[in-house]
């Protein structure tokens, strides 16, 4: 499970509403028959119009300052293994998101308990993803594409008589580069913009920064976890418990989907990997044989090379940790929080 939380992307004028983001989320359904479209949904309704999403989110911004984000984006991306467990069923995902938003509400630290009915949100399921320019497969194929482009340009020059050369020889060099390119999908070199194969279903959630009464703010990016301040002369609780939310997100999926989560898929494992690699390694090696086999298979599927014959336990541990750091460690950026392997 991968979850990313980010604030509204503010323009230079700080006046843009949610309309552009809603339009972006409608792109996948352009040209689809109405019966085949994925609709926006909320806690109680399966079909919410884009127009209502815009009016409700943009109309729920009382007392926010010009430079304040008016909404947050939460992107929930189950792994292909998790999607396979629910047969990639949108109905299961809607059920999961509605339970997840209960966890989201419960993670706020307030004087009065926050529940899902205090949250104004709208979600939409998407089924496709495309490779982006910064992804490993695209970056590692880039040099091969550059050399192929040069060779094709040389072929055109030879055909125009601008340079001397053997077209067939140049074409064979191009074929060789295609074969050598490290990342392919269905026999084609992976490039930016190419749609990813397999289950790619994910959910975008637009959640208002203000509660449903448009009275107080609820920020999941608040840095003050479970703190107290004096507001209007009264002690006031504030903050968002991210650990609680992240841990609940996977437990809720497991409950809703009947999913048997492996150790390396857990938030606890990610924390151990980042903060206590020795504990991560010990937990990995200490798994029952069947679970350990699954764990290593999952790690290999993320591009990690694991030694088959452990000659020296410490040496193997370091190789595993370094491999994880290169292959599946995800940086936490100031504008975004993410979890998941």
Image (cartoon, rainbow, N blue to C red):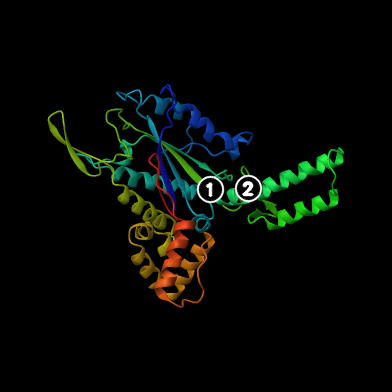
Which residue shows up at 80% across the image and 51% down it? 171
* Disc marking residue 133: none
Classify 216 as above or below 151: above
Q: Element at badge 1?
A: loop
Horizontal arrangement in the rendering, residue 308 relative to residue 166 (left or right): left
Residue 261 in sight from this viewpoint: no
Which residue shows up at 31% across the image and 27% down it? 214
Picture quarter with the C terminus: bottom left
Quarter of the rendering containing residue 237: top left
Classify 318 as above or below 219: below
Classify 327 as above or below 233: below
Q: Residue 125: give x, y in percent of width and height.
A: 51, 42
**Residue under circle 1?**
201
Most foreground residue, 29 or 334: 334
Quarter of the rendering containing residue 337: top left
**Residue under circle 2?**
142
Q: Element at badge 2?
A: helix
- The outermost residue toward the left is 233
């Amino acid at each position: 499970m991968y979850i990313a939380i980010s604030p509204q992307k503010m323009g230079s004028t700080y006046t843009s509403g949610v309309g552009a983001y809603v339009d972006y989320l409608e792109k996948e359904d352009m040209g689809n028959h109405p019966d085949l479209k994925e609709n926006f949904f909320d806690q109680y309704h399966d079909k919410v119009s884009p127009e209502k999403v815009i009016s409700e989110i943009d109309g729920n911004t009382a007392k926010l300052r010009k430079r304040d984000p008016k909404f947050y984006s939460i992107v929930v991306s189950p792994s292909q293994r998790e999607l396979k467990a629910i047969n990639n069923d949108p109905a299961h995902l809607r059920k999961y998101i509605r339970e997840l938003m209960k966890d989201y509400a419960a993670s706020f630290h307030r004087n009065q308990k926050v529940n899902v009915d205090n949250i104004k949100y709208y979600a939409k399921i998407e089924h496709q993803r495309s490779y982006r320019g910064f992804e490993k497969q695209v970056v590692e194929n880039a040099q091969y594409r550059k050399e192929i482009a040069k060779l094709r340009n040389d072929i055109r020059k030879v055909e125009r008589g601008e340079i001397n050369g053997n077209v067939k020889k140049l074409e064979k060099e191009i074929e060789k580069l295609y074969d050598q390119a490290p990342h392919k999908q269905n026999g084609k070199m992976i490039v930016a913009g190419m749609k990813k194969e397999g289950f790619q279903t994910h959910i975008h959630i637009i959640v208002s920064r203000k509660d449903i009464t448009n009275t107080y703010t609820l920020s999941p990016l608040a840095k003050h976890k479970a703190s107290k301040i004096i507001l209007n002369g009264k002690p006031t609780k504030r903050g968002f418990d991210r650990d609680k939310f992240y841990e609940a997100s996977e437990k809720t999926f497991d409950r809703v989907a009947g999913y048997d989560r492996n150790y390396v898929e857990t938030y606890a494992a990610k924390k151990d990997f980042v903060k206590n690699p020795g504990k991560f390694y010990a937990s990995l090696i200490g798994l029952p044989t069947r679970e350990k086999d699954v764990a290593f298979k999952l790690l290999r599927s993320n591009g990690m090379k694991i030694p088959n014959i452990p000659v020296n336990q410490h040496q193997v541990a370091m190789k595993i940790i370094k491999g994880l750091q290169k292959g599946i460690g995800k940086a936490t950026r100031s504008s975004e929080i993410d979890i998941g392997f």
